[in-house]
Amino acid sequence: MKRTIVTMPGDGIGKVVLDETLRVLDAAGFEADYVHADIGWEFWINEGNPLPQRTIDLLAEHKIGLFGAITSKPKDKAAEELKPELRDRGFVYSSPIVGLRQHFNLDICIRPCKSLPGNPLNFIRKDAQGGFEEPEIDVAIFRQNTEGLYVGVEWTNPPAEVRSALETHPRMKNFKSVPGEDLAISTRIFSRNACRRIMQAAFEYAKKFGYKSVTVCEKPNVIRETSGMMEDEARKVAKDFPGIELWSTNIDAQMMWLTKNPENYGVIVAGNMFGDIVSDGFAGLIGGLGFACSANIGEEVAVFEPTHGSAPKYETFDPSIVNPIAMMMSACMMLDHIGEVERATRIRKAIAAVVAEGKVKTYDMMKLPGRQEVISQGAATTQQVTDAIIGKL
Ligand code: NAI
Ligand code: MG
């Protein structure tokens, strides 16, 4: 059956890396109908909405989205760039990718971080003899994508009823004398259902891809209620997966162990903010933004995207210099998700072969500052990387 995939290039380099990725999917023999969907800055400027309803409708219909990246700008700047006839009509900018996650309840974010042998950006550390060793990292971070600190239930100068509700908690007594305008409050809200869903997804993934452990990375000794709920659900779900060990780490300690023994971890699960932190940390060990892929998965809809943004400074580079691998790896996650695991494996192998060979490298892999001149300094263009990967396929 031919799939329909909603493609959302978005802004800046999102357009570049998505086009290159479609070339690789074609070369791998993946047959799909691609429908373009509008998202990003252009639609904010011209329509006052970076996530038009027609895009939501397309995703609701076809369920699978491939997303490049969008540009977000601060509130004032956004208002300024709105086309004149839309100004002062009450349009307020908000990030369309966050909007998509909320609209479709894409609550499970998966960010795999796997080192590719030969990648010059791989993390190395000193060994006991004073030489160097390169740990082989293969971690998949499951980040709860819709709750926690990022929901935005927060106040400076909270309304009186919020304040008095909070004052029913004995620990609020320390803040009793703080004037409202000097008090900022953010809430960290977890729901049991969401904790259970992300745990279930993490254990299923561990089973499907042969990971031996699932680590809950929270802070239950201090943030007892929310982190504690995540741990409770982990213990319950773990009972159904007897072959997989359940570990628990604190986010702070995990950030230290990240460089000490990253090879020991398999699947890691965390709430929204800690998941954001720990996934960026691991991404840095395997090559950074040019390699960091992700999936946002809900009950019905799933959207696959590189973790990088639109890198506007490279938008107009011709030829393009950016690394398309993060987007291609995100497309591989899409293939896994729709049951095309074999094809995803072939593309991953082709990418790994190009990286291992080390002949075709984007500027980031050569550790050059991102300028147009990198091409004359021996860096590959985005298109040349794609061609090399297609050659391996
Ligand atoms: P960014 O990820 O766009 O770029 C940061 C830097 O990382 C770039 O300057 C470049 O040096 C490097 N980089 C990023 N992607 C790369 C690639 N594929 N190959 C090689 N190097 C790459 O983040 P930044 O500069 O903070 O934000 C730029 C815009 O992107 C902002 O408007 C921001 O709001 C937006 N953004 C969007 C995201 C999304 O669409 N999910 C995520 C992060 C930022
Ligand atoms: Mg982040």
Image (tube, rainbow, N blue to C red):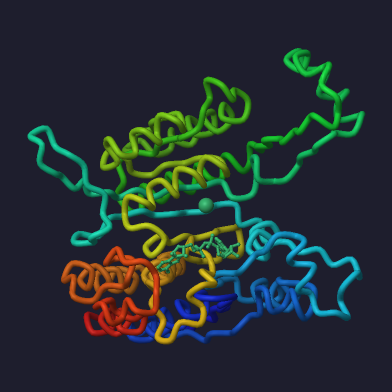
Q: Which residue is at a point 23% across and 84% down the rendered structure image? A: 391
Q: Which residue is at a point 51% across and 82% down the rendered structure image? A: 316
The answer to whether residue 143 is above or below residue 369 is above
Image quadrant where residue 290 sits: bottom left
Residue 125 vs residue 296, the one in the foreground = 125
**In the visual, does 58 lie left or right of 132?**
right
Residue 91 vs residue 36, the one in the foreground = 91
The answer to whether residue 308 is above or below residue 85 is above
**In the visual, does 192 lie left or right of 178?**
left
Q: Which residue lies furthest to the left in this view?
A: 129
Residue 223 vs residue 16, the one in the foreground = 16
The answer to whether residue 233 is above or below residue 176 is below
Residue 341, image x and y in percent? 35, 68
Q: Which residue is at a point 10% across and 41% down the rendered structure image? A: 131
Residue 6, image x and y in percent? 58, 78
Image quadrant where residue 330 sits: bottom left
**In the visual, does 14 lie left or right of 146?**
left
Q: Which residue is at a point 90% across and 34% down the rendered structure image? A: 159
**In the visual, does 65 lie left or right of 74?**
left
Residue 62, image x and y in percent? 61, 76
Count of picture labels: 0
Residue 231, image x and y in percent? 51, 30
Image quadrant where residue 353 sits: bottom left
Quadrant holding the C terminus: bottom left
